[in-house]
Image (spheres, rainbow, N blue to C red):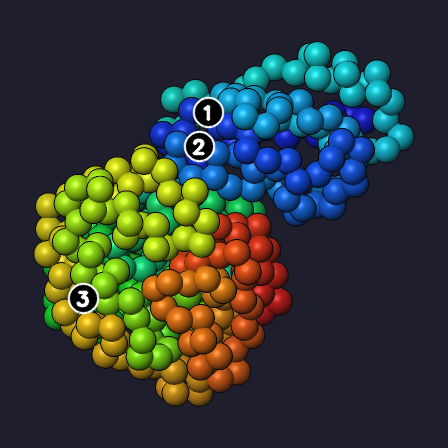
Amino acid sequence: MSENGIVAITVPKWGMAMDEGTVTAWHIDEGGTVEAGDEVLDVESTKIANAIEAKQAGVLRRQVAAVGQTLPVGGLLGVIAPADVGDAEVDTFIDGFVVVAPDDDEAESGPQPQSIGVHGQTIQYLVHGEGGVPILLIHGFGGDINLWMFNQPILADTRAVYALDLPGHGGSSKDVGDGSIAFLAQATIGTIDALGLETCHLVGHSMGGAVAMQVALDHPERIASMTLIAPAGLGPEINGAYIAGYIAAERRKDMKPMVAQLFADQSLVTRQMVEDVLRAKRIDGINAALATIAAAQFDGDRQKLDLSDQAGRLDLPKQVLWGADDHIIPVSHANHLSGANVTILDGAGHMPMMEKTPDINQTIAAFVASQV
């Protein structure tokens, strides 16, 4: 921010592989007022499109980049300034703006995945931020720590935020035992112990939501709150064809329709995203681990484990967030957890943390902050 309150909106860096972004839409006209957290425009990378929020209130004085224009990471997209700042000052700011993109050394100095021993296995995790009662992010079936790339840095503004690779996923050991939620929950609480976290807020997505519930049931004294995003374990139905198709897919043409089912907006599914999913699946041992997990937890279109009654009796703050257009687990399951705050997000599918990032980040941040 400049001394006179002028703020640059720049192309963010969503992951190590992102070098540039393309403007796909402006949501605020020039001259429009914005509040901190408002979605100002959409930017698309080779992986996914996402909204960029205003970091402070003011007036959108300039749309520097037009729709369709591609800029490097750090490039100037627009300018927010107080209404009483003169146009000449805004123009001077734009003329003097210098793109400062993170170089390789800077990027490598940021948070990097680490590993820790848990019950004879290796668990990979990533931590952003420090202090406060930490948040632990738990991904779903076939995911990894990269699932949270749009959420973890934002949530880490006020506290430490950990993301882990469950056994059988990402950089963690590929032994998944019997593939049950109980086995994955034991690995998760073991990770919490190994990291020295006395208590933490759990945020679990899909299968990770069921893992979060099992951890909370086994160790309620260690859990400050629980946020479940489109979780498994709250009802019987699940899209069994998706699970089987995901495991079987070995080529891009087979994986693309699987990935597409995760999103309400099909245009978000890029070639790069599909190739990244396939690359992660090709890590030695992952597909066998996923097959073991699927056999343990699903029977066609049915989930074998329903934790709704037990988790509903947990005396701890809990909330459920769900995309209204979820094609993997029915959104109707959102109402199966007694005592939970429920938020349904229109225009989102099974991945609301990627399709409705600002809403998810703000809802989680406000929820955990209210528990302190």
Q: Which mark is residue 280?
A: none
Does residue 277 lie above or below 164 as drawn? above
Q: Secondary structure at mark 2?
A: loop
Mark pair 2, 3: CA separation: 32 Å
Closer-to-camera residue (323/226) = 323
Q: Which mark is residue 294?
A: 3
**Quadrant containing the N terminus in the rendered view:** top right
Mark pair 1, 2: CA separation: 7 Å
In the image, 355: left or right of 291? right
Place residue 142 in its image quadrant. bottom left
Q: Position of residue 208 (x, y in %)?
A: 33, 64
- Look at the numbered discs 1 and 2 and tell me whether their residues touch, using CB distance below 8 Å: yes
Q: Residue at x 24, y 73 (%)?
A: 301
Q: Residue at x 46, y 49 (%)?
A: 265
Q: Residue at x 20, y 56 (%)?
A: 245
Visible residue check, residue 218:
no
Q: Amino acid at mark 2?
A: Ser
Q: Amino acid at mark 3?
A: Ala
Point out the tag, 2 or 3, that comes first from the N-terminus: 2
In the image, 319: left or right of 217? right
Q: Position of residue 282 (x, y in %)?
A: 15, 43
Q: Which residue is mark 2?
A: 45
Q: Position of residue 351 (x, y in %)?
A: 42, 55
Does residue 164 lie above or below 30 as drawn? below
Visible residue check, residue 363:
yes
Mark pair 3, 1: CA separation: 37 Å
Q: Position of residue 195 (x, y in %)?
A: 33, 57
Q: Amino acid at mark 1?
A: Glu
Q: Secondary structure at mark 3?
A: helix
Q: Which residue is mark 1?
A: 20
Point out the tag, 3 or 1, that comes first from the N-terminus: 1
